[in-house]
Image (cartoon, rainbow, N blue to C red):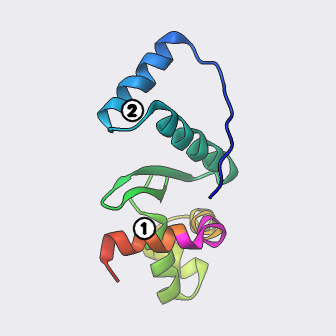
Amino acid sequence: MPTIVQSCRIEENHAALLSRQAKRRHLEVSTLSSLYLKEKALEEEFPGIGFRDAAGGREAYVLGQRVAVWEVVDVYHEAKSISRTADHFSWPAYLVKCALAYAKQYPDEIAAQRQAEVGE
């Protein structure tokens, strides 16, 4: 995917923090900054979705839960309804809707995350 260059200013102590995190992950600071910026923008666009490290790299998950978005999608495909999916997880329906909205917008990403975890 084509990229563009954007710059921003951050406080010196935060720049040092970002640099340490990038070094720990064996990434360039610009790569980690781009990742963090993208994920934060997505979290704002899809309240209730967060990102974490997983077996296949970064994955979308439901905030406050230990469930990846791809897992919600799998249960939804079996349950065939939002309410039954919510019942399965003992969640309010809005959490399921949030996960499904994210998955609908980024189906290739969700499929890749599922593939990395279950290998199917």
- Residue depicted at 30% across the width and 33% down the height: 24
Q: Position of residue 99 (x, y in %)?
A: 57, 65
Q: Is residue 8 above or below residue 93?
A: above
Q: Is residue 24 above or below residue 94?
A: above
- Residue depicted at 52% across the width and 72% down the height: 86
Q: Name the residue beneath numbered marker 1.
A: 113
Seen from the viewer's position, the closer of residues 33 and 45 is 33
Where, by quadrant of the figure, is residue 2 drawn? bottom right
Residue 70 lies in the magenta-colored region: no
- Residue depicted at 66% across the width and 68% down the height: 105
- Segment colored magenta: 102-108
Q: Position of residue 110 (x, y in %)?
A: 50, 69
Pointer 1 or 2: first along the chain: 2
Seen from the viewer's position, the closer of residues 3 and 36 is 3
Q: Residue 22, labelled with which disc?
A: 2
3D distance between C-alphas at marks 1 and 2: 22 Å
Q: Is residue 89 visible?
A: no
Residue type of the residue flagged with mark 1: Gln
- Residue depicted at 69% across the width and 51% down the height: 45
Q: Could you classify mark 2 by the number of other residues whose Cα lies within 10 Å: few (under 14), some (14-19), or many (20 or more)?
A: some
Q: Could you classify mark 1 by the number of other residues whose Cα lies within 10 Å: few (under 14), some (14-19), or many (20 or more)?
A: many
